[in-house]
Image (cartoon, helix red, strand yellow):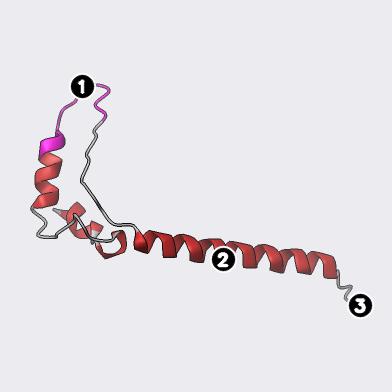
Amino acid sequence: MKWKLNIRTEVKVVTALLAISCLIAFSERKRSTVVCKDIVIELDNASENHFMDEADVLRLVESSNQSIKGTSLDRIDFRTIEKN
């Protein structure tokens, strides 16, 4: 059995993988430089079920004992905030 190598296909696959890797690396780098400037909470209550309002959510975020304003997004622990 003889294996036939198709170099054009292999080059295309390698080029696509490199391009995807570069895009992921650049997006991660950009995310680490974004700083939270303000907390904006918008809830869409289409069916008028008001279990929580914006003030309740803001109170939960502020009670997480994290300084969010002025902190880069990669340093904010969103899991801790969501657990509260």
Nearer the observer, 69 or 48: 69
Which residue lies most toward the bottom here? 1
Q: Residue at x 15, y 42 (%)?
A: 57
- Determine whether, in the image, residue 33 is placed left or right of residue 27: left
Q: Is residue 77 magenta?
A: no
**Dominant secondary structure (helix, strand or loop) of the stretch shown in magenta:** loop
Instruction: Identify the magenta region.
Output: 44-55
| Circle 2: element type | helix
Q: Earlier in the sequence, mark 1 or mark 2?
A: 2
Cα–Cα gap, marks 1 and 3: 68 Å
Nearer the observer, 7 or 50: 7
- Determine whether, in the image, residue 42 is placed left or right of residue 62: right
| Location of residue 7 in the rendering, given as x and y in whole percent from the top left corner | 84, 70
Screen quadrant of the N terminus: bottom right
Which residue lies most toward the right here? 2
Q: Residue at x 15, y 35 (%)?
A: 54
| Location of residue 25 in the rendering, given as x and y in whole percent from the top left corner | 50, 66
Location of residue 54 with respect to 70 vertically, above or below = above
| Circle 1: element type | loop
For mark 1, what is the residue? Answer: 48
Amino acid carrying mark 1 in the image? Glu
Q: Which mark, residue 22? A: 2
Camera-near label (3 vs 2) is: 2
| Circle 3: element type | loop
